[in-house]
Image (tube, rainbow, N blue to C red):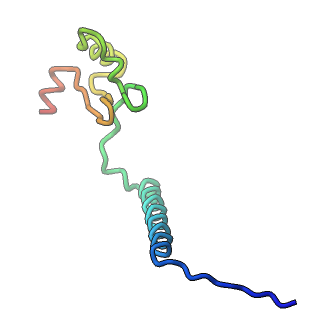
Amino acid sequence: MDSVTIMLPVPPATALAIVGTAVALAVAFLFRYLRSYTSKHGGESNRLPRVPEVPGVPLFGNLLQLKEKKPYMTFTRWAETYGPIYSIKTGATSMVVVGSNEIAKEVR
């Protein structure tokens, strides 16, 4: 018995989509590898130490915790827990909070 193989041509748009996806995946894996390589070999030694972050809710961050009429009381409570410098998330944005006048003068 002879088998017959029929090869259908691949449309150029499909071939381009396949090649584009392969290139995007290769770049993503290369970026991920280089990032992990630099963090293991001292690439992050130039960075400042991380600031304590107040845990929040995904997507909203700490916005739901600031629902009080006097949010400064929440900030004061967080400063007692996390120290005079800490970070919060307001939605997708991170903010660094300085809870001491003396440190705020130094930061300025």
- Judge whether 94 appears above or below 30 on screen: above
**Residue occupying the far right of the picture:** 1
**Residue occupying the far bottom of the picture:** 2
Where in the figure is residue 13, as x and y percent of width and height?
Answer: 45, 73
Q: Residue at x 32, y 36 (%)?
A: 92
Quarter of the image with the C terminus is top left
Which of the 4 quarters of the picture holds residue 52? top left
Q: Residue at x 31, y 14 (%)?
A: 67
Which of the 4 quarters of the picture holds residue 65? top left
- Residue placed most toward the observer, 77 or 22: 22
Q: Residue at x 46, y 59 (%)?
A: 37
Where in the figure is residue 3, as x and y percent of width and height?
Answer: 80, 87
- Residue placed most toward the observer, 56 or 41: 56
- Residue placed most toward the observer, 17 or 102: 17
Quarter of the image with the N terminus is bottom right
Where in the figure is residue 61, as x and y percent of width and height?
Answer: 37, 28
- Residue placed most toward the observer, 75 or 63: 63
- Judge whether 29 appears above or below 88 on screen: below
Where in the figure is residue 101, as x and y percent of width and height?
Answer: 15, 20
Count the marks: how many?
0
Q: Residue at x 64, y 84 (%)?
A: 7
- Judge whether 43 appears above or below 82 on screen: below
Classify residue 87 as left or right of residue 22.
left
Classify residue 58 as left or right of residue 80.
right
Classify residue 2 as left or right of residue 8.
right
